[in-house]
Amino acid sequence: MQLGRVVPIAIHPTPGAAKLLERYLTLYRRRWWILATGVLEPVFYLLGVGFGIGSLVGTVSVGGRELPYPVFVAPALMAAAAMNGAIFDSTFGVFFRLKYAKIYESMLATPIGVPDIALGEIGWSLLRGLVYSSAFICLMAALHLVASPWALLAVPAASLVGFAFAACGCAAATFIRSWNDFDLIQLVLLPLFLFSATFYPITVYPEGVRFAVELSPLYRSIDLLRALTTGGLGWSIAADVGYLLAMGGFGLWLTSRRMGRLLLR
């Protein structure tokens, strides 16, 4: 028996991770409607808030430019879709497979190792978030809510958002003790969604509060996608990318360590 062993994560794709990703693709090929339902939530917010409340708001001033309210809100909802899609499976799914189904223990009886499991789970959660955000930006384009050709980079940017949240979601799942603990995750996600300049400019906050909001991972995601879809590019997007890469890298490292301790003890 191995006690306290920690397996470091591979920093490159592995065949085992690809096999795990293939497993989920095969599984959801017959459950595609589950993914389709995940796209509807941001669409409802866009129709209800973006166009509904937007008809009362009119335009929003961002960086000295006046943007129609739906154009302002849409990229924020795209970022939230990437976050929710990545978080859902990387927390609920990983917890179930780790604590109840014991699927990972069975996988370790094959050539698949802990690094493969970590990368495969994060990759699948990333892909799920990417499906949500890709479908949403197609809707944005159809509704003429894309104001810049830089929006072509929004999908790769959304994949970065998905990676950051998926990695941290997988890491968080290894600390969850019971289903009741998922209330804590919702306690984090809901304030992120409401207060990360999703529905109004960050300038409405006092300076001290604004600084705290700028540290929010969803705000960095929204700032990046909003800049790309509206054309308001600036040096802040470099900070956004760096932040999300660091967040994803940390989550990847922590997931590997925690899974190593839980599965190989």
Image (tube, rainbow, N blue to C red):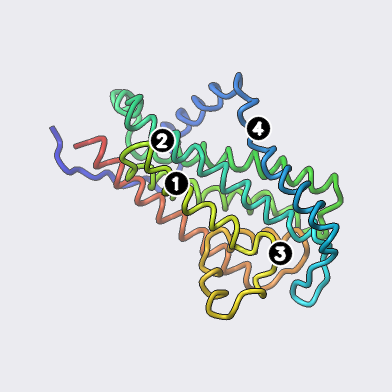
Q: Name the quarter where the N terminus is drawn.
A: top left
Q: Earlier in the sequence, mark 3 or mark 2?
A: 2
Image coordinates for residue 194, horizontal then vertical, percent: 60, 58
- Amino acid of disc 2: Val
Residue 240: image quadrant is bottom right
Would you name the residue on which mark 3 appears? Answer: 227
- Amino acid of disc 3: Ala
Identify the secondary structure beneath mark 2. Answer: helix
- Amino acid of disc 1: Gly
Q: Earlier in the sequence, mark 2 or mark 4?
A: 4
Label 4 crowd (10 A; few <14 / some 14-19 / many >=20):
few
- For marks 3 and 1, give the CA distance: 25 Å
Would you name the residue on which mark 2 appears? Answer: 94
Identify the secondary structure beneath mark 4. Answer: helix
Marks 3 & 4, CB-CB < 8 Å contact: no
Q: Nearer the viewer, residue 156 or 173?
A: 173
Label 2 crowd (10 A; few <14 / some 14-19 / many >=20):
many
- For marks 1 and 4, give the CA distance: 20 Å
Q: Earlier in the sequence, mark 1 or mark 4?
A: 4
Would you name the residue on which mark 1 appears? Answer: 169
